[in-house]
Image: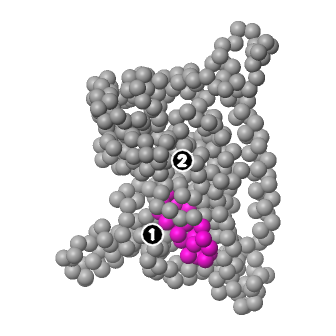
Amino acid sequence: MIDKKNKIAEEEKAILVGLVTKEQNEAQVKEYLDELAFLAETAGAIAVKTFYQKLSHPDSKTFIGKGKLGEIKDYVWEKEIQLAIFDDELTGSQISNIQKELGIKTIDRSDLILDIFASRARTAQAKVQVELAQYQYILPRLRGMWSHLERQGGGIGSRGPGETEIETDRRIVKDKISLLRKRLVEIDKQAFTQRKDRGEFIRVALVGYTNVGKSTIMNILSKSEVFAENKLFATLDTTTRKVVYENTPFLLSDTVGFIRKLPHHLVESFKSTLDEVREADILLHVVDISHSQYEEQIGVVNKTLQELGAFEKPILTIFNKMDLYEQNTFDKWLEDDVKQEILRDLKKKWENVTQGNCVFISATQRKNIDELRETIMRKVRELYEIRFPYKTDFFSGNGQ
């Protein structure tokens, strides 16, 4: 793993910076910055203040205007801030210019997400994927934010004639990327072999935005103890369990959560982890319906599924956290019949959108879990009957 000098320390005080443009309005930027604050907290930093500016397009040198940068500088010095996090990707020269002006470490959303992924990676596959994404992030930024990489070699004959230090570093990074890709291919082959050995089971994968409750649902359905935490990217490595319900077995996988503005190189690096999504027979799209921007989050997940070529699979949408939705939506003076009418309208809307392929639950409160199980099993059995009609033991009560 890259030994990054700007690795986020615990309890680091940070300011967050966003930009209102033609592509993202003020309300969206505020929502993105709220999410960025949650990302910062997950990484171990404390977001003490947010700044945003309206510009037609980012400034090529400092991303934001000089006046706003000066305002931020005054605040940073007064409050002894140690870290500036920008919500959009910065170029190497922008990072260098901003750090020079503010005098503190400066990173963007991509770098922050990479830092979180690096701290959460447990398996060899995840560690290689994260390291590959880190080097891919660094490569185009070397010239602007150049800080000398540790030499693997050195001395007479170690460089080509006339080669500059930055060209040497670029070559080192490219070589490292090549080695990591080869290593990832080897790991992927091993993972593919393991997946093939699972036999002719129907495979079900949990997908969704990060922190929507996938791991909690995984624990309920599989009666296992998958790590679940109220932080972004609590799950990084794919977990698969065999589930048997009413004599019908299937494989259930929990996958890494999706997020807005996920770095493209990170998506590329983690495509092998997301093979569980591409190879699944049924997708369970978990949605945090209590979140104010849950519809936008649904769009982010659907777009990612399209990029993975998995959007045409059978999808059951699980609207989770209904208990929190009711707390956020209903006040104590609202009459029960009005509450029920609001809930009926909500369910009717999404039943129409999903063509009836949706369930409304609260995983933490264990509400409507039986309906969820029955719906999943109905879909699993339908697929077994189509794909393996000779496996009648699964439905006769003799399955193992």
Q: Amino acid at mark 1?
A: Phe
Residue 176: x, y in percent?
A: 71, 33
Compute the Cα span from label 1 to label 2.
27 Å
Residue 37 in the figure: left or right of residue 118: left
Nearer to us in this view, 310 or 262: 262
Image location of residue 51, percent across then percent down: 31, 38
How many numbered callouts? 2
- Residue 345 visible in the shown view: no
Classify residue 221 as left or right of residue 66: right
Q: Is residue 161 above or below residue 356?
A: above
Quadrant that contains the N terminus: top right
When the figure is inspected, residue 322 is found, relative to residue 371, above or below; the finding is above
Residue 190 place in picture, x, y as percent: 80, 54
**Secondary structure of residue under mark 2:** helix
User: Which residue does the numbered mark 2 point to in the structure image?
Assistant: 116
User: Residue type at mark 2?
Assistant: Ile
Residue in view at x 38 percent, y 23 percent: 101
Query: Residue shown at 53%/69% (left/top)?
Result: 216
Q: Which residues are magenta?
A: 206-226
**Magenta includes 261?**
no
Disc 1 packing (10 Å; few <14; some 14–19; many ≥20): many
Can you identify the residue that label 1 sits on? 319
Kindly identify the residue that appears in the image at 61 percent across and 77 percent down: 223
